[in-house]
Every structure is written in C-alpha cells, then in structure tokens.
Image (tube, rainbow, N blue to C red):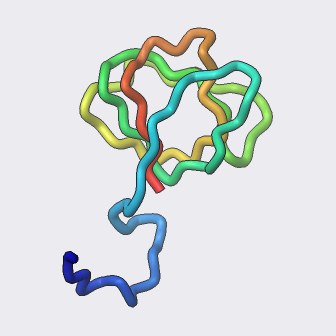
Amino acid sequence: MSLDLFSAEKIELDAPSEQAFAITPDNNNDLQLVTRGLYVGGAGDINMIMAGDSAPVLRKNCIAGMVYPWRVKRVLSDNTTATNLIGDL
C-alpha cells in the first residue's frame, strides 16, 4: 500500500488529477462524468460540449501530450480527429 501524505487535503480544480478514464467520442451520449481536464494523446481537433454549454465548440489543432483544463460533458465523434483522449478527474 502506498502512503498518501495528501489524502486529507481538499481537492481543488487546479490540483493534480487523482483519477482518469478513456474517452470514446460519441455524438449522442454524454460522458459518465464531467472532466476537470482533458488529455490529448494524438494531435488533432476536438469537437466537444463543455460542462456549462449546450452547443458544441470545435477546438482546433490540439497538441499531443497536453492536458487541457477543460470541463467537458461530451466529446462528439463528428469532426474530432484527436486520438487517445483521457478525461482527468
């Protein structure tokens, strides 16, 4: 078992993520959990619906290997060319 010296600390949005999940873009279904960050494994565009919005926004030219501080509720398959997307919690 690993000792966690920070387990009693309150988790803020700017703190390091503690959990993650793979994202499969889907035009019809929201993610099970709203992200606090989005990791892009392969460069490209991401068509998404942010946590507070109802209309999609297309983020162009996202860089591979980057974690973006986006609270996302859906990643659409249409026009999403970035790959290996991971939602950080």
Please tell me whether residue 3 is drawn above or below residue 38 in the rendered image.
below
Whole-percent x and y of residue 11? 45, 75
Direction bottom: furthest residue:
8
The residue shown at (27%, 26%) is 64
The quadrant holding residue 54 is top right
**Relative image position of residue 1 (x, y in whole percent):** 21, 77
**In the image, residue 37 lies at what x, y percent?**
45, 48
Q: Where is residue 14, by image quadrant?
A: bottom left
Q: Left or right of 34: which side holds 12?
A: left
Tally the numbered discs.
0
Residue shown at the point (46%, 73%) measured from the top left: 12
Is 4 rendered above or below residue 63? below
Residue at left offset 29%, top offset 37%? 66
Image-based side of 72 in relation to 42, left or right: right
Q: Is residue 14 above or below residue 10?
A: above
Left or right of 64 on screen, residue 81 = right
Left or right for 88, reference 67: right
Nearer-the-camera pick, 24 or 53? 24
Say which residue appears at 38% left-offset and 18% top-offset. Answer: 61
Name of the residue lying farthest toward the front: 1
Nearer-the-camera pick, 65 or 4: 4
In the displayed orientation, state which residue is furthest to the left. Answer: 2
- Residue 84 in percent (x, y) is at 37, 25
